[in-house]
Amino acid sequence: MAISSLVKNFSLATVGALATSLVAIQQASASPLMNGDFETGDLTGWTTFTTPNGTLGPGFPNVISFDTNNDGISSNSARFRVGEVNFTNQYAGGGIFQNVNLSAGDLTISADIASVLEERTNASGGKVELLFDNIILDTYDFLDIDANIPEFSFLLSSLSNITAGTHEIRFLFTRPALQDGRIQTPVQYIDNIVISGSATKSVPETTSMLGLLAVGAVSLGSIMKRQKQQKVTGKA
């Protein structure tokens, strides 16, 4: 298609409308947190760790389909079977963490968690802690748990005046008991990890996008101006 035809059907107003739409889409969909719902089918974006004398369990962690928030719909969830390596009756285990780049502002972190036991009863379904930059924000301890009766809960915390930069979000799963690899050891689940708030808005990326569109708008304006001059002078 000739440039003159493009110019005839494309205007600076169109560029402006496109810029507004793209920015709105970016602000609505972009999140500094990667793979918070584990829909990749694995732990992409997350780093695993263990505590001293702790274990995540033989073959764990992994990602399977499970109804972690008890809404009747299963989805990919990260799964752990934590506990002590040597019995000391002290909480031990491990978990996952991720570094995220945040803007200055407010932040809310939430996640759905669950614990399941396949046989008998157990005095500890597992304690789950949410940490931000190594500071504990929220904790839930499943305590006593019975076989085949899943326990459900969630973690939630809000922060104000977050500084711009890289921050760590960590989830720690522990139990004060041995993890012996048998089905009598409870399994812990986590899913739907979400961060929201003004601190999650990516200002640099939005600025870059607007800059690129501005360059396109200036270039289009130059083309239109040249086309207009050619009509007036009759020169190519």
Image (cartoon, rainbow, N blue to C red):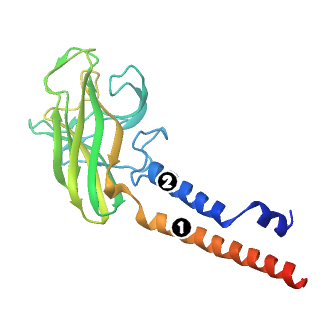
- Residue at image position (45%, 47%) is 44
Instruction: Assign a secondary structure to mark 2.
Output: helix
**Rendering quarter of residue 10:** bottom right
What x and y, as percent, mark residue 29?
47, 49
Residue identified by numbered label 2: 24
Residue identified by numbered label 1: 210
Type of amino acid under label 2: Ala
Identify the residue at the far front of this view: 232
Vertical placement of residue 155 versus 222, above or below: above
Residue 180 relative to residue 19: left or right: left
What is the distance, in whole Å, between disc 1 and disc 2 at their CAs?
12 Å
**Rendering quarter of residue 233:** bottom right
- Residue at image position (39%, 26%) is 66
Vertical placement of residue 230 versus 112, above or below: below
Q: Give the crowd class for mark 1: few <14, some 14-19, many >=20 residues within 10 Å.
A: some
Q: Give the crowd class for mark 2: few <14, some 14-19, many >=20 residues within 10 Å.
A: few
Residue situated in front as seen by the camera: 158 or 128: 158
In this rendering, the count of numbered labels is 2
- Residue at image position (28%, 32%) is 113
